[in-house]
Amino acid sequence: MKKSVIVASLVLLGSSTLMMANDAMKDWFIGGEFGGMSMKIKVSATDGVTPFNESDTLDTTYETLKVGKYFDFGRVYGH
């Protein structure tokens, strides 16, 4: 996770510098998004005789790099 944050930061810094240097590129942008979630799941049931209990935890993170362009009607981007 740390490596991806550092790489994304360097890409953003380098591309921002290039974008500011060229007026023809001023409508383009590069952005990043980082996030994560943690879900705790508990299930209790019975089949009529035997009780059943189960629990689990799901921890996940994501990193996204977005590249796009501003237009008069809004912006279009992909990641």
Image: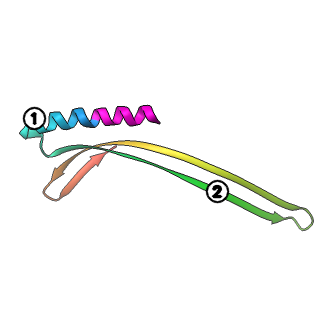
Q: Quadrant of residue 2?
A: top left
Residue shown at 46% from the left, 44% from the top: 62
Residue designated by label 1: 21
Task: Judge by depth and name the residue closer to the eye, 70 or 56.
Answer: 56
Residue shown at 67% from the left, 58% from the top: 41
Q: Main secondary structure of the magenta part?
A: helix
Q: CA distance from mark 2 to mark 1?
A: 48 Å
Q: For the residue labelled by badge 1, is the local secondary structure a helix, a strand or a loop?
A: helix
Q: Position of residue 3 (x, y in %)?
A: 43, 31
Q: For the residue labelled by badge 2, is the local secondary structure a helix, a strand or a loop?
A: strand
Question: Alpha-carbon neighbours of circle 1 within 10 Å: few (<14), some, or many (≥20)?
Answer: few
Which residue appears farthest toward the left when viewing the image?
Answer: 23
Region in magenta: 1-11
Residue shown at 47% from the left, 36% from the top: 1
Query: Cβ–Cβ below 8 Å for labels 2 and 1?
Result: no
Report the amino acid beneath label 1. Ala
Question: Alpha-carbon neighbours of circle 2 within 10 Å: few (<14), some, or many (≥20)?
Answer: few
| Relative horizontal placement of residue 69, taking residue 52 as reference (left or right) | left
Residue designated by label 2: 40
Report the amino acid beneath label 2. Lys
Q: Position of residue 25 (x, y in %)?
A: 12, 40
Q: How is the image coloured?
A: rainbow
Q: Does residue 46 belong to the magenta stretch?
A: no
Q: Quadrant of residue 30?
A: top left
Mark 2 or mark 1: name the one nearer the start of the chain.
1
Residue shown at 32% from the left, 36% from the top: 9
| Relative horizontal placement of residue 39, taking residue 6 as reference (left or right) | right
